[in-house]
Amino acid sequence: PVNKKNVLESGLVKAKDSALIVDYIDIDLPKSALTKQRILMLDVLANNDWKRPIYFSGGSFDSAEYLWMKDYLQLDGLVYKLVPIKTAYEGIFEMGRIDSDLMYDIVKKWEWGNSGEDIYHDPQTRSQGLSFRGNLARLMETLIEEGKIEKAKEVIEIAMTNMPVEYFGFYAFVEPFVDGYYKVGETTKARELFDKLKAIYQDRLEYYAGLPTDEQYRNIEDILADMEAYRRNIDILIENRDRDLAQKETLIFNEYLDKFTQLALCDAITK
């Protein structure tokens, strides 16, 4: 059951969203067994009565880690807060609703240390950047949808300054910011970020193109992944109606596609 009075008094949900609060939450428990830690978590939930926030750390795909309530979460920075507002689960990278003003205030207070400096960024640091980039991208997109363009610009700069493309890898998580720059009217910066990503994919594809055909076949999944990522970035240009650049870059992309005619990548990428 949801104690709406406690929900509002404790600040779990803002008054402006009070109409979204549900009367109760159904929890579909597993029929086989419950482990002790899940029973403990359920006991905390049962006795909390919405007087204090309950948070879940991210990074897990298991529904049990969220007490089978993935539809009732709110992304607050890097953690998920249990809220009595239903937001349909659409995948781990789209989980939870976003209160853009609250999350904006949170990320503005993050301390980044030397993350954007020219130091060694170990594999663990780079992989942890996935959560930061992904969550900042979601906040940026929400702010843009709500017309809060200046705040969206700040969020993009936070991401790009503190997690530079060349240090953190995982380039697919940079793509939303190319689109974001276009959406906030920063066309020059969008093109500059596109150029950085393009150069990375071109460099990789040049390497693969120089391999013997049998080795190309052994690396075909990586070649295809890089080619598809390269094309996705050109699609961003097209979607944002940067027509002249899109036309020019499509011709260059086709030249790289032609380097692998023996692998029949064209049909695979088109599909």
Image (cartoon, rainbow, N blue to C red):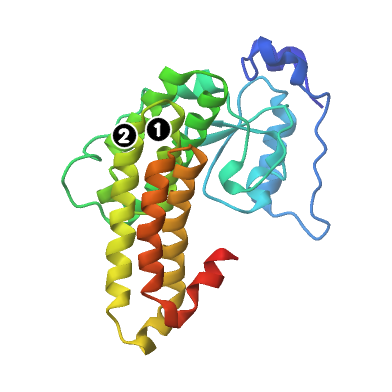
Compared to residue 258, the image places residue 85 above or below, namely above
- The answer to which quarter of the image holds residue 8 is top right
Query: Residue under circle 1?
Result: 181
Q: Which mark is residue 254?
A: none
Pointer 2: residues within 10 angstroms few (<14), some, or many (20+)?
Answer: some
- The answer to which quarter of the image holds residue 230 is bottom left
Front one among 75 and 35: 75
Q: Disc 2 vs disc 1: Cβ atoms closer than 8 Å?
A: yes
Query: Residue under circle 2?
Result: 189
- The answer to which quarter of the image holds residue 178 is top left
> Of helix, strand and loop, which one carries label 1?
helix
Question: Which residue is drawn at the image coordinates 26% and 50% (left, top)?
Answer: 167
Residue 134, horizontal then vertical, whole percent: 47, 42
Residue 158, horizontal then vertical, whole percent: 33, 30
Compared to residue 237, the image places residue 198 above or below, namely below
* Residue, far left: 118
